[in-house]
Image: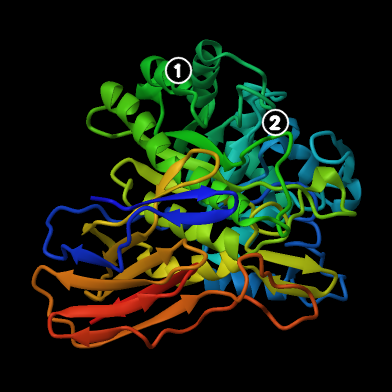
Amino acid sequence: MKKIVLFLAGAAVSLALQAQVRVSIHETAQNQPVIPAEIYGQFSEHLGRCIYEGIWVGPESSIPNVDGYRSDVVKALRDLKVPVLRWPGGCFADEYHWMDGIGPKENRPKLVNNNWGSTVEDNSFGTHEFLNLCELLGAEPYISGNVGSGTVEELAKWVEYMTAENGSMAELRARNGREKPWKVKYLGIGNETWGCGGDMTAQYYSDVYKRYALYSRNHGDNRLFKVACGASDYDYDWTRTLMKNAASKMDGLSLHYYTVGDWNHKGSATDFTADEYYNTLAKSVEIDQVLRNHEVIMDVYDPQRRVALLLDEWGTWFDVEPGTNPGHLFQQNTMRDAMVAAFSLNIFQKHTARLKMANIAQIVNVLQAMVLTKGSQMVLTPTYHVFRMYNVHQEATYVPTDYSCGMLVSPSGRAMDDFSACASRDAAGVLHVSLANPSLDKSVTVELSFDQLKPGSVSGEILKARRINAYNDFGKKPEVAPAPFKEAKVSGKTVQLTLPAASVVVLEVK
């Protein structure tokens, strides 16, 4: 029986006490899915300072760079093991015409970014710059094609330009400095076509999708994984219509889910109450049920689960930092964001029988970013540290866990577990367990037990802070950074530890 904690007038009122959570780890379970590395995917859009200054400064910049890419950001992203990178949007993608971003930079036309702050876009970062970055990072490119204002021919020629070995588009690519085609796996046929990507109905878009997908052809040995634009949040009718009309023509269906309580009053990223913290966390974990609901619909039309579900935009969305352009979506990143990331990733890993990708928004300087830059300075965010600690789960085999914990009911009325855990086994047979305690004022004693494993050693890392709204700022010592976790002890056939309040721990058990 779960304990229930209600939040009244900003204070937690415990209706029952539970001093310990016992986690049963079923490492002997058979036929478990491999956790795709793409669950740790990233999203980059021509929005604010994500691309320019965030990733790209140009080879002439005084900021240290590798062929125009910021050296500090490239190193940080390599350490993160970014598996897939989505580009150029977002809403920007459906006003982006790829031929504006190729050839000599001085000849590339400028445009106004109508979606994001009316910034002038000079197109100095285009197809070559993006795909070369993916090669530099070792990441799979995920191209978001222009369906809203583009044409079938335009998208077809872009695919040919990137992936064909011969023909006029390949010759044009060679004249622009790249003779060998790139490998491009993921192709999104439009973005948010129910909104900024065309304001379409699901019925209409399902026909549009099939037409664009038909002419986006495979060239040579490159094989496209074609992704249809899926629903926002709770729009289950959109998923039903797309699966009914076009499932046989798609490899994946996207989904967008942002942690926003009120779109008109999103709240501050750094100045928030305990109530607002619990409301945010409870909204974020609601993705668990949202995924289940979409998966049930997909199972009706695709019981073999051939079509993947791709959560290619997710994360927190707060008010922009004071004094910044409202259209640039620059927000700080606190320990609260780290808790959202930990709970979300633990959830995603339990859905990988259908969920094959999750791309957080966005990689640099926008929304729940991995890194923030200011001139020549860069900081790693609390969310970055969670992703780096959790990357041990990439391409590891999912290991089922059972545990009985309490339940929190937030001031907004949403319920959530007051504990989170997930486990996997890597190719070397090493077991990793990720744990999170959301409580602001209570630690939890945890006991890990195993089907057969007799643990010999345990090590780990912990992420916590003195304040839940702590963040890392430019020119200051980081307030949120991982540290070795030495409190976990082997006791007979179990591992025992105490998980501090508002903390994330990743253990390695051998």
Q: Nearer the viewer, mark 1 or mark 2?
A: 1
**Tally of marks:** 2
Q: Which residue is mark 2?
A: 94
Q: Which mark is residue 291?
A: none
Disc 1 to disc 2, how far (Cα)?
23 Å
* Percent of width and height locating residue 49: 79, 55
The vertical placement of 231 against 393, above or below, is: above
* Percent of width and height locating residue 185: 47, 46
Q: Counting other residues with Cα less than 10 Å from the Cα at mark 1, is it few (<14), some (14-19), or many (20 or more)?
A: few
Q: Give the residue at x 73% y 38%.
A: 265
Q: Give the residue at x 56% y 51%.
A: 360
Nearer the observer, 339 or 400:
339
Q: Which of the 4 quarters of the picture holds residue 371?
A: bottom right
Left of 61 or right of it: where is 68? left
Amino acid type of the residue tagged 2 in the rendering: Asp
Nearer the observer, 506 or 375:
506
Amino acid type of the residue tagged 1 in the rendering: Asp
Q: Give the residue at x 44% y 68%.
A: 442
The vertical placement of 114 against 277, above or below, is: above
Left of 374 or right of it: where is 167? left
